Image: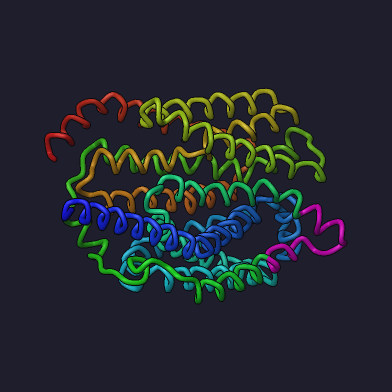
């Protein structure tokens, strides 16, 4: 009888805990939605400056005679990330996710309003740097926050962030067409985005978060860096953070100019390339999430950039509207569909003792790419940018081949270290 009573008690306790977990999940789901919607607006923010019609309007507003020069402002987003990444993560851990989200939202409001009303390049550049800072604070707060909310499905939780970004980019041509249809300026779009993310920021103040999201403690980035033991493989994976970012950022920011000036796509149709690109990214998110359960994700670090290289070469050689649209889909799939995330996951798997530090370094390499490569692209022709993209992507393939060749030994070494 005592045993039966204990057994019933344990069953009731288990049922109670299960009910509490379900209640907690439901309690935090609106908070997760707010965090994801921030990334829908981020999807608009990180691609608005790549839209040819917006670039042309801003070039006129700033007294420029070449829309490609606007790419230098997009590069400032990378500079903002580069400046803020070393301390955004530790601050997120020390101050809590909510504070970091609010810092990110406030910075994004300034970015959107600054772009919409910028009277010159200098003001726009400062606004773009703040946009990069916003991205860093949102990343270092939202990735851990959604993982803490959906702690049983962390992979799905973080994939949701990329999904909301891709959906926003997929809808960009629709948004631009909607603005044009109402005879408003294209710069109305960043202004509306700024208002929406400000509202989301107010909601984030009151949104409940798990206790571990509210406060924490961490060591500084520099302290972790001093204790790290780097190898050639870890350096190669960090450099893949640079090359993989270059492939999709150069395409995202410069392909529409190539499509219009070289392939002869009409101005009113060239933004459709964005739709194909985003569709490719969305397909990759679902397909790759299935494939990596059957094959080692490190293999895709070679396969996807190799596919992107072939596609870039075909676009360069054929130069037709059709190949540009096909290329947009393929680059969206093979370059923007998770290579950077898989490189980060691989580096965490192979170097678990310096996980946080090396992840930060991959993201810093990605941000350094945004700044340097897009700054260079602003002073090049559309064809020159495409050629540079081919060269960098080939380097990424070679780095991935090296990592794959060493992968077996690295896994064995990692297992022994445990």
Residue 98, magenta (yes or no):
no
Residue 354 appears at what percent x and percent y?
Answer: 22, 49
Residue 184 falls left or right of residue 127: right
Q: Quadrant of residue 215?
A: bottom left
Q: How is the image coloured?
A: rainbow
Residue 392 appears at what percent x and percent y?
Answer: 46, 35
The image shows residue 105, relative to residue 308, as above or below, that is: below
Residue 137 appears at what percent x and percent y?
Answer: 44, 65
Residue shown at 28% from the left, 24% from the top: 405
In-front residue for pair 116/89: 89
The image shows residue 305, relative to residue 14, as above or below, that is: above
Residue shown at 67% from the left, 46% from the top: 170
- How many numbered tags mark residues here? 0
**Residue 187 seen in the current view:** yes
Residue shown at 65% from the left, 23% from the top: 317
Q: Farthest residue toward the front?
A: 1
Residue 322 falls left or right of residue 282: right
Residue shown at 52% from the left, 27% from the top: 309
Q: Quadrant of residue 222?
A: bottom left
Residue 414 falls left or right of residue 324: left
**Residue 400 seen in the current view:** no
* Range of residues picked out in magenta: 176-192
The overriding secondary structure of the stretch rendered in magenta is helix
Residue 401 appears at what percent x and percent y?
Answer: 35, 26
In-front residue for pair 271/83: 271
Give the quarter of the figure containing the C terminus. top left
Q: Quadrant of residue 394?
A: top left
């Amino acid at each position: 009888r005592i045993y039966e009573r204990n057994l019933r008690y344990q069953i009731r306790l288990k049922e109670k805990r299960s009910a509490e977990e379900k209640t907690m999940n439901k309690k935090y789901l609106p908070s997760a939605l707010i965090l994801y919607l921030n990334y829908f607006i981020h999807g608009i923010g990180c691609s608005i400056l790549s839209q040819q019609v917006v670039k042309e309007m801003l070039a006129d507003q700033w007294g420029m005679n070449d829309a490609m020069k606007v790419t230098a402002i997009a590069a400032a987003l990378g500079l903002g990330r580069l400046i803020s990444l070393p301390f955004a993560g530790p601050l997120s851990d020390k101050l809590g996710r909510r504070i970091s989200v609010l810092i990110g939202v406030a910075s994004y409001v300034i970015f959107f309003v600054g772009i919409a009303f910028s009277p010159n390049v200098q003001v726009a550049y400062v606004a773009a740097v703040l946009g990069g800072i916003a991205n860093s604070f949102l990343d270092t707060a939202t990735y851990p926050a959604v993982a803490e909310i959906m702690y049983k499905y962390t992979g799905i939780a973080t994939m949701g962030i990329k999904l909301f970004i891709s959906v926003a980019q997929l809808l960009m041509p629709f948004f631009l067409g909607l603005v044009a249809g109402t005879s408003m300026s294209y710069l109305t779009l960043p202004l509306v985005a700024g208002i929406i993310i400000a509202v989301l920021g107010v909601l984030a103040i009151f949104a409940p978060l798990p206790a571990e999201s509210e406060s924490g403690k961490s060591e500084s980035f520099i302290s972790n860096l001093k204790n790290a033991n780097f190898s050639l493989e870890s350096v190669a994976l960090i450099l893949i953070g640079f090359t993989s970012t270059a492939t999709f950022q150069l395409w995202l920011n410069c392909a529409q100019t190539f499509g219009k000036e070289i392939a002869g796509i009409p101005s009113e149709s060239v933004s459709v390339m964005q739709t194909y690109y985003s569709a490719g990214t969305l397909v990759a998110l679902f397909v790759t999430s299935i494939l990596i359960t059957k094959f080692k994700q490190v293999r895709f670090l070679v396969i996807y950039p190799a596919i992107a290289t072939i596609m870039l070469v075909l676009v360069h050689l054929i130069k037709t509207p059709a190949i540009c649209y096909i290329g947009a889909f393929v680059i969206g799939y093979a370059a923007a569909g998770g290579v950077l995330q898989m490189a980060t996951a691989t580096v965490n798997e192979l170097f678990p003792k310096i996980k946080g530090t090396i992840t930060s370094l991959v993201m810093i390499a990605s941000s350094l790419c945004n700044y340097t490569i897009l700054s260079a692209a602003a002073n090049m022709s559309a064809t020159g940018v495409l050629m540079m993209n081919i060269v960098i992507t080939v380097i990424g393939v070679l780095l991935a081949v090296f990592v794959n060749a060493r992968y077996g030994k690295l896994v064995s070494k990692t297992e022994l270290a445990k």
